Image (cartoon, rainbow, N blue to C red):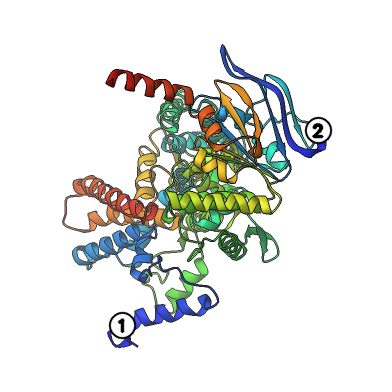
Amino acid sequence: MSAINESVPNMIQANRAQAPEESKPTDERVRKLSPWRILLDRPELGSIAGTVLVFAFFGIFAGGSGMFALDGIINWAQVAGYLGIIAVGACLLMIAGEFDLSMGSMIGFAGVMVAIPPMYLGWPLWAAVIFAFVGSMALGALNGYLVVRTKLPSFIVTLAFMFILRGLTLVLSTSFANSTIVSGIGDKFTDDPVISALFQGTTFHWLFNGLASMNLITKLPSGDPVVGGLPKVLVWWIVMALAAGFVLARTRFGNWIYTVGGDSNAAKNVGVPVRRVKISLFVLTAFCACLFGVLQVADVGSAAADRGLQKEFEAIIAVVIGGTLLTGGFGSVIGACFGALIFGVVQIGISYTNIDSDWYRVFLGGMLLLAVLFNHYIRSRAAATK
Amino acid sequence: MADDFILELDDVSKFFGTVIALQGVTLRLKRGEVHCLLGDNGAGKSTLIKTLAGVHLPSSGTYRVDGEEVRFNSPREALDRGIATVYQDLALVPLMSVARNFFAGREPRKKLFGVIPVIDMNYANETARDKLAEMGIRVRDASQPVGTMSGGERQCLAIARAIHFGAKVLILDEPTAALGVKQSCNVLKLIHQARERGISVIFITHNVHHAYPIADSFTLLNRGQSMGTFSKKDITKEAVLDMMAGGTEIQSLVDELEGRAA
């Protein structure tokens, strides 16, 4: 027994490994991996490390500024939530090896699809919301159809739609509202109980009131909690992330996403319906963009032609920080969520510090570059351990 | 005696525009035999297997499976008839786990909480590991990425997968082309194992040294035409080599070189 030299974790690992392998001969060519190494091979690792770093950074530079008080937390969490919703869709699509650059424009377009019919055409709001979702998803399907049909890079096809949709948004809002902003839609949301319950304001008020009455969260002078409830955007984010993560990890469709992104020719040869998978993921990204747009219109009370500007890039950055490969076939929804969280913390957090907020983009670009380098390193090892 | 043959191509031609890829090729695969398809680059081997695999429809001629004429519109249809093709790219995704690759497109499912269909990962891992163990490959953990396996192991994984999913006919496209000596040997053993199980194999190669030991019969292709099918007992390795590896070309090269030296 040479156990004296072995550290405790090593021994535990060795014991665990021995038990199930007793009946089988072991392969002398296989070497054991340390738990650290197994952790290193996870796609999320970079984004989790990044999140820790970012929190540490702002903990030091903005710790006493109220950034980590409840209202501060809700502040940056909300930014992360919006981005997180589209990052979840973008993540699955990128794992399948495609991009959707029209997501940002789709946010604006979905906004006017929701706002214009009730304001100028006399539609009920619920019909406009359904119209917006159906319309966006149909456009997503068109995107996907063009990509799989022409075999052109999705980059170029969706780039075209990025301009088409942004332009249409501007045309529609100026021709109906005579302005780049379609306002006054907020009241319509408040008047529709179902739509309002789904997309507007906050929820879990009882929890926040309860916590406030137990003095666990800060109260306003009136006795109400400083934050009335959990913004619905966060609920949507969590629901979407859990659903997407589950589908990816546990279902047949998830396996198809990985296969299609890893090697679409191989996927076709083993009988995976490559086209169907890709088109449905373009529909998903469009759905996510529309959800973003509807939530934002409900929150702000207006639609505007510049909503969602550059969000497609932010979503891609969040996904890449989250460890998903630009080439597809590898990635994680949890990672993308951490990527979105980093975004929210940095974007809002920087205004809590003494740092000039103009540095925000520099910071993000640096973060992206680091993430890509890190992921490249991880991938080259995961793909070829030999 | 038509039902002696599991696959039959009768006088099959395939044209791509003005290009004649195959011209009147006849190929008959006996049940349970290993049939070697030999030919140099550009001989039409790829077109021939893609026709068998359902990727191409023949431009003329008939294709019979179990004596029954078929017209496959997709590889899926050929697969459903038990004709599995292992291409050179192996249709494996390096970043995905062994088990996920093994079951890609045909994932085993179970119901989570009795309602949500999910992949039965335990079953997938165990089955993939067991099937590979039968082929003599021990996988430490079926959830490791395929990228960690050697070329020979990947080839075996692709073949094991085809056999597991009920292949009656296995079409192997140059399975030993990229492999070392020992790994090639393993793949040849695997082909033998498949034959023992009653699976008919079409083995495409241009390496006679790999083909001769394992094959029961040979078909030689040259410039889109079949130079005939030979049973192993009717032909020597040297004769096969001569016919296929451009024996005459080599000989004339030798003559030329020697002539020049002299």
Q: Which residue is denoted by mark 1 in the rendering?
A: A6
User: Could you tell me which chain the residue with mark 1 belongs to?
Assistant: A
Q: Residue A105 appears in which quarter of the rendering? A: top left
Foreground residue among B72 and B245: B245
Q: Is residue B21 above or below residue A355?
A: above
Query: Can residue A120 be seen here?
Result: no
Secondary element type, mark 1: loop
Q: Which quadrant: the C terminus of chain A?
A: bottom left
Q: Amino acid at mark 2?
A: Glu
Is the N terminus of chain A in the top left, top right, bottom left or bottom right quadrant?
bottom left
Q: Residue at x 71, y 31 (%)?
A: B72
Farthest residue in the top direction? B18
Left/right of residue A234 with respect to residue B113 in the rendered view: left
Q: Which residue is mark 2?
A: B68
Q: Residues within 10 Å of mark 1 (few under 14, many from 20)?
A: few
Type of the residue with mark 1 = Glu
Residue A133's label in the rendered image is: none
Instruction: Say which element carries label 2.
Output: strand
B19 in relation to B8, above or below: above
